[in-house]
Amino acid sequence: MARERPQPHRGRRPADRLLGVASLHEGDTVVLFYLRADCHRQGIGRALQSAIEQHARAEGRTQLRLLSTRNTRGFYEAMGFVPDGEPVTIQGVLRGYPYRKALAGPVAGAIT
């Protein structure tokens, strides 16, 4: 079976300065979500998360899943994600916290 390539989404990019990136893999798994440290708490993460959700809904996805770091759990919970199991060890060192979020139906005018 062929694997789906991750779908990139970008945050705002004023003056050709990339502020954040995100990527979906296999349709419903967020495998990358990163903002520059100087861009936190400015609404950029929320906008980027909204774009990911719109893209997933447009593809007919009903949920998103991800592994959060300890430091980003609050952000994902504020975005409506809920814990989805026990923490896991990543590469023998890091702890990942599984989360999921149910998505509402397709959004009119969603980005495809």
Image: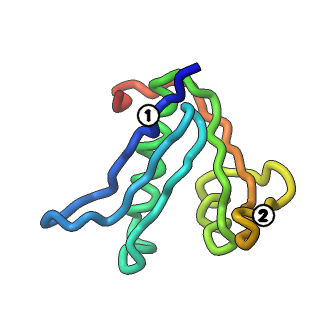
Quarter holding the C terminus? top left
Say which residue appears at 56% left-offset and 33% top-offset: 26
Instruction: Return the x and y of residue 77 as percentages of the image width and height.
Output: 67, 59
- Upstream in sequence: badge 2 or badge 1: 1
Say which residue appears at 21% left-offset and 67% top-offset: 17
Residue extending farthest to the right is 86
Say which residue appears at 63% left-offset and 28% top-offset: 62
Picture layout, residue 70 above or below residue 63 = below
Q: Identify the mark at residue 55; answer none if there is no mark.
A: 1
Label 2 SS? strand
Label 1 SS? helix
Horizontal arrangement in the rendering, residue 13 relative to residue 78 (left or right): left
Instruction: Return the x and y of residue 64 as percentages of the image width and height.
Output: 62, 40
Q: Identify the mark at residue 89; answer none if there is no mark.
A: 2
Please rate how many residues cluster around mark 2, counting C-alpha atoms within 10 Å: few if below 14, some from 14 to 19, many from 20. Answer: few
Q: Identify the mark at residue 108; answer none if there is no mark.
A: none
Instruction: Return the x and y of residue 88 as percentages of the image width and height.
Output: 80, 59
Q: How is the image coloured?
A: rainbow
